[in-house]
Image (cartoon, rainbow, N blue to C red):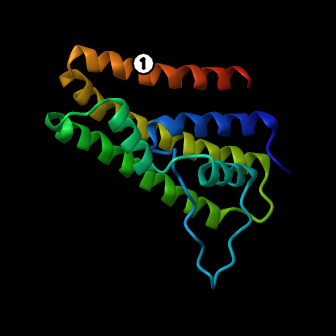
Amino acid sequence: MHPTAFSRHLVTGFAAASVLLAPMGAARAQAPDAATPPAAPTEMHRHVHRVSSHERETVDERIAKLHAELKITPDEETSWGAVAQVMRDNNTAIEKMLADETAAAPKEPTAVDDLKSYQKFAQAHADGLTKLIAAFDSFYAAAPAEQQKLADRVFESFGHKGAAMHRKV
């Protein structure tokens, strides 16, 4: 049994939200051990891998892009570095989770298996976002008003894309 269209849209929304924040956004499945054949991935895993492998920036590319868009100054490098590190840590956690979930996927996953797997990824995304907000809040609070407005515009443009995607569900 394959997951419903609703489940696939939820995964798509999760994947889209991850792009901006990159804790999950650049999740890429690690190459399986050549000696061990991989377990059959669920539809969700195939979708997340396909999106992350072909349509997304790496976490370091996203960090560099945000660094440029937010016009990080040399004086801000320390607080920005904390934000970037959280993004990298979140990405590493998702990569590990994706590899673990793919390796443990049942041969014939059910819709319930797929939803449980999605729940794990959604929870990891929420946990990562909590960490990212704390780091970004410190950076944002110390930024000059003009740079805060710039950050608001950068994040607002993402929010509209994400909201539009969720309305399609």
Element type where label 1 sits in the image? helix
Q: In the rendered image, which quarter is residue 108 located in? A: bottom right
The residue sitting at 33% across, 15% down in the picture is: 149
Amino acid carrying label 1: it is Arg
Q: Against 5, is 58 above or below?
A: below
The residue sitting at 68% across, 72% down in the picture is: 38
- Pinpoint residue 13: horizontal percent, then vertical percent: 63, 33
Q: Residue furthest right?
A: 1
Left or right of 30 on screen, residue 63? left
Report the residue marked by disc 1.
153
Q: Residue furthest bottom?
A: 35
Q: Residue furthest left?
A: 75
- Pinpoint residue 150: horizontal percent, then vertical percent: 35, 20
- Pinpoint residue 143: horizontal percent, then vertical percent: 21, 23
- Count of marks, rendered view: 1
Q: Against 108, is 80 above or below?
A: above
Q: Against 122, is 136 above or below?
A: above
The residue sitting at 47% across, 19% down in the picture is: 156
- Pinpoint residue 16: horizontal percent, then vertical percent: 59, 36
Left or right of 126 on screen, residue 135? left
Q: Against 154, is 72 above or below?
A: below
Within 10 Å of the Cα at label 1, are there few (<14), some (14-19), or many (20+) other Cα atoms? Answer: some
The residue sitting at 73% across, 38% down in the picture is: 7
Left or right of 144 on screen, residue 32? right
Q: In the rendered image, which quarter is residue 46 located in? A: bottom right
Looking at the rendering, in which quadrant would you find the C terminus?
top right
Of the pair 86 and 104, the residue shown nearer to us: 86
